[in-house]
């Protein structure tokens, strides 16, 4: 069954021993806290690791006006971007020198293929990511709803443990990165 923001928050509230919610519009402290904290915790959890289900590549649209500063060109970033991972050109998603300023990517290249982390919908969250988000939500909701600092600390440790396991699982979703330039090895062979 696909997850929703409300179902994830309800699961986190149940983990706390609080009353689950059916909507963010309910006139309860649980619904109000969940509505305020969910987007922040979701985005922070998504950005905690370059999760494979959040990765995307796109060719960026160039601005018509050149930037005022250090680079020759400026490009619009995608609307769903959480963070930039790398930029390249000529069919490669990495290798460019760039800087992100105010929602624009600046570089000296005339075209840019951006590799970035996007904001995924809850329905796209894989089974290994859901416990991480639920645990982090429960930890964040604990203090405002229960005022129990000891319980919040336990939930924070649980969230860290869930994050470690989920990162391990996620890292097995693609070919491991290899070392392409190891200066010490090159110097020894010369």
Image: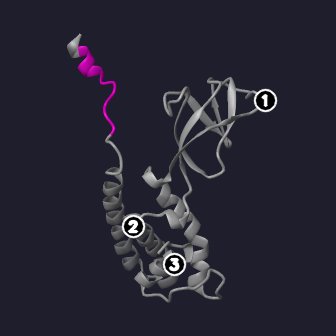
Task: Examine the structure image and report whether residue 185 is included in the region drawn in magenta.
Answer: yes
Asked whether the beta carbons under mark 3 and mark 1 sit within 8 Å of each other, the answer is: no
Please indicate, yes or no, whether residue 51 appears anywhere in the rendered image: no
Is 2 on the left or on the right of 23, as rendered? Answer: left
First in residue order: circle 1 vs circle 2: 1
Q: Which stretch is magenta?
A: 177-187
Determine which quarter of the picture holds residue 97: top right
Near-viewer residue (74 or 149) = 74
Q: Which numbered disc covers residue 33? A: none
Where residue 38 appears, as percent x and y from the top left, is 56, 70
Give the label, 1 or 2, closer to the camera. Answer: 2
Q: CA distance from mark 2 to mark 3?
A: 14 Å
- Colouring: one colour
Q: CA distance from mark 3 to mark 1?
A: 45 Å
Q: Which numbered disc covers residue 65? A: 1
Q: Which numbered disc covers residue 7? A: 3
Please indicate, yes or no, whether residue 15 appears anywhere in the rendered image: yes
Q: CA distance from mark 1 to mark 2?
A: 44 Å
The local crowd at label 2, few if under 14, some if 14 to 19, many if 20 or more residues have their Cα within 10 Å, is few
């Amino acid at each position: 069954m696909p997850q929703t923001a409300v179902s994830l928050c309800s699961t986190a509230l149940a983990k706390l021993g609080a009353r689950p919610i059916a909507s963010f519009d309910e006139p309860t402290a649980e619904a109000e806290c969940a509505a305020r904290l969910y987007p922040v915790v979701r985005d922070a959890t998504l950005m905690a690791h370059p999760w494979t289900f959040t990765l995307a590549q796109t060719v960026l649209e160039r601005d018509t006006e050149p930037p005022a500063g250090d680079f020759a060109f400026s490009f619009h970033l995608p609307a769903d971007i959480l963070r930039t991972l790398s930029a390249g050109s000529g069919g490669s998603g990495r290798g460019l020198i760039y800087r992100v300023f105010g929602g624009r990517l600046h570089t000296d290249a005339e075209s840019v293929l951006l590799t970035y982390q996007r904001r995924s919908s809850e329905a796209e969250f894989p089974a290994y990511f859901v416990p991480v988000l639920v645990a982090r939500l429960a930890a964040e909701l604990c203090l405002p709803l229960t005022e129990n600092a000891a319980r919040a600390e336990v939930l924070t440790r649980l969230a860290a443990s869930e994050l470690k396991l989920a990162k391990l699982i996620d890292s097995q979703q693609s070919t491991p990165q290899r070392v392409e330039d190891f200066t010490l090895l090159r110097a020894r062979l010369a």
